[in-house]
Image (cartoon, rainbow, N blue to C red):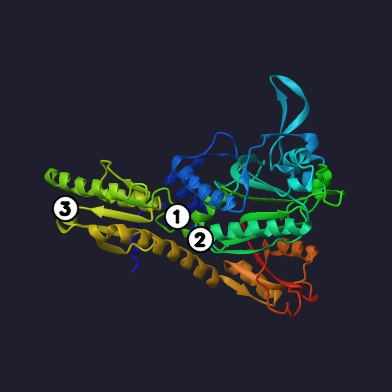
Amino acid sequence: MVNDEKFVEDIVDQDDNFSQWYNQVVRKAELADYAPVRGCMIIRPYGYALWENLQQKVDARFKETDVQNAYFPLLIPQSFLQKEAEHVEGFAPEVAWVTRGGGEELEEPLAIRPTSETIIGNSFSKWIQSYRDLPLLINQWANVMRWEKRTALFLRTSEFLWQEGHTAHRTPEEAEERTRLMLEVYRSFAEEDAAIPVIPGRKSENEKFAGALRTYSIEAMMGDGKALQSATSHNLGDNFARGFDIQFLDADSQRKYCHTTSWGMSTRMIGALIMVHGDKSGLILPPRLAPYQVVIVPIWRKEKEKEAVNELVNRVEKMFKGKVRVKVDRSENTPGWKYNEWEMRGVPLRMEIGPRDVQNNNVMLVRRDNRVKEPVSVDALEQRLPELLEEIQKALYQRALEFREQNTYTTDSYDEFKQIIAEKRGFVRVKWAEDSAAELAIKEETKATLRVIPFNQPEGGVQGKCIYTGKPATCEAIFARAY
């Protein structure tokens, strides 16, 4: 049974004020802090360790698909942004400009990159000459700047960290295949490593990336029922290739334009981890990403007990060195304080070692997700502890999946749709005719947006009428309020 005791009294309950709960957890768990520059954040060591683990997992998945890492400049000439009209129009309100350098006015203003399609497109045009140079598969881990008006730590900041992948291909079919492949990479990471169930699918014309042919995304449901776009993958067609003259000589001796893609995931995923898994006591981190997978708390009352306890602590620490990320809390704080602190920080497993454990050659393992306690013999620990971490990983995913299913609705009535959006939380799946004007009208009337047109569609096609226009439906779509 889950113990409902409130362990961290100064964190507001999620049900009372989810936004305040989120901000308190981010700061009290020392993930991030506000910066002196408006809309920016400082990522603290614990938060950055979480980002590093995420980065390592995602980067390994990229490399399995033959992607290589590179780095491109932060500053982008204004003329580059203007080469793809739809792209520059889409990003114009968010671009920060550098107009002076060394006290002198610059001949050409430089944009602080909101994204790198343009400067990478310029490089691709030099590097690609023949079909033998294709495909070109590049990723960069970098920061970007988007001058946001409303900001929230990790979820939406003016400067944030991310990766952006950029590829060039010989045919439209190859570009589409790569676009979908990278979305699948994100889906598998989100579900297998972050323990976050996501819905993969296509974005509407209104919601697609500026300059893209098609945009795909994975959408996740947060603990308050709102949606979060967790990663995107864009098929750019030959739009950027034409803008930046990315051509190649094909085997038939004809010069042709490449077909390009771009795809990205950011520190926003840390926000998703907090909001999907966290509870009223703070963070709950999935073992595969947690900076510390196990925290060991030594317990003793008398000085003569200390030596034996520490001896077992050191033995266990050595046992898992290089295998499991272990933190021994040797601070002078009380055991109760340590329990509260590491619960708030979301460490998946707590290991308590006291005098009685030494006598019995046991340790006590306490799960963060449900607080279930399990005594384990030291002799069985090497086998049991990794098993338990994997059980927690799967349990977190299953709990999040059940929450999403419990808060997903279907309706054929627009009046009922409006009632669900106004009074309940979660996703609403409806029949849809892909009408951009209707989509904007729904957003205006309900504040709900079309999050994704899922790949998972009814067999044989959709039967029936669009929930808003009454036209024959062409697909099913998911609407929700979103971050």
Q: Is residue 97 above or below residue 465?
A: above
- Circle 3/circle 2 CB separation < 8 Å: no
Cα distance in 3D space between marks 3 and 2: 38 Å
Task: Specify which label sits upstream in the sequence, 3 or 1.
Answer: 1
Q: Horizontally, is 474 left or right of 23 in the view?
A: right
- Circle 3/circle 1 CB separation < 8 Å: no
Task: Specify which label sits upstream in the sequence, 1 or 2.
Answer: 2
User: 180 or 154, which lies in front?
Assistant: 180
User: 133 or 228, which lies in front?
Assistant: 133
The residue drawn where x is 68% and y is 77% is 458
Q: Which residue is mark 1?
A: 288
Cα distance in 3D space between marks 3 and 1: 31 Å
Cα distance in 3D space between marks 1 and 2: 9 Å
Which is in the foreground here, disc 3 or disc 2?
2
Quarter placement of the C terminus = bottom right
User: Where residue 12 sits in the image (x, y, percent)?
Assistant: 44, 54
User: Where residue 22 sits in the image (x, y, percent)?
Assistant: 49, 52
Badge count: 3
Q: Which residue is mark 2?
A: 192
Q: Is residue 237 above or below residue 142?
A: below
The residue drawn where x is 56% and y is 63% is 225
Residue type at the position of mark 1? Arg
On residue 355, the disc is 3
User: Where residue 224 sits in the image (x, y, percent)?
Assistant: 53, 61
Residue type at the position of mark 2? Glu
Q: Residue furthest left?
A: 304
Under tag 1, what secondary structure?
loop
- Circle 1/circle 2 CB separation < 8 Å: yes
Q: Horizontally, is 474 left or right of 147 in the view?
A: right
User: 307 or 430, which lies in front?
Assistant: 307
Residue type at the position of mark 3? Pro
The residue drawn where x is 78% and y is 50% is 211
